[in-house]
Image (cartoon, helix red, strand yellow):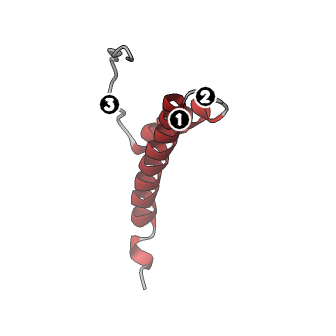
Amino acid sequence: MEEELEIEYEYADTRAEVITQCYNAIAAVEMLDPITKSGQERKKRILNKSLRVIDFYVSQIHDEVFEDQED
């Protein structure tokens, strides 16, 4: 059984900071080669969540930049 971790964090103030934090999370786990199934699932979960958050915020930024150029 895994020990619960108590993590203190602060909310990022900008989308750029959130994207950077997700990128750092991806970089931290990308090179890991977990042996256990739970380790593999954790790595996959972190990658998927980070990519989803990045996609969300990049889409917001894109929409703001190109809002006047819609067809």
Figure check: 1 above or below 53: above
What secondary structure is found at the residue carrying circle 1?
Answer: helix
Tell me which amino acid carries mark 1.
Answer: Lys
Q: Name the secondary structure under disc 2.
A: loop
Residue in front for this viewpoint, 46 or 15 = 46
- Disc 2 residue type (three-letter): Pro
Q: Is residue 19 visible?
A: no
Q: Which of 15 and 8 is in front in this view?
A: 8
| Label 1, residues with CA under 10 Å away: few <14, some 14-19, many ≥20 | many
- Residue at 55% across, 34% down: 40
Tag in front: 1 or 3: 1
Q: How far apart are marks 1 and 3 (CA)?
A: 22 Å
Q: Which of marks 2 and 3 is nearer the N terminus?
A: 3
Look at mark 2 in the image and give the residue it sits on: 34
Label drawn at residue 11: 3
Q: Residue 42 appears at what percent x and percent y?
A: 48, 33
Residue matched to label 1: 43
Distance between mark 2 and mark 3 Cα atoms: 29 Å
Q: How far across and down, in percent of the image, does residue 22 sit?
A: 49, 38
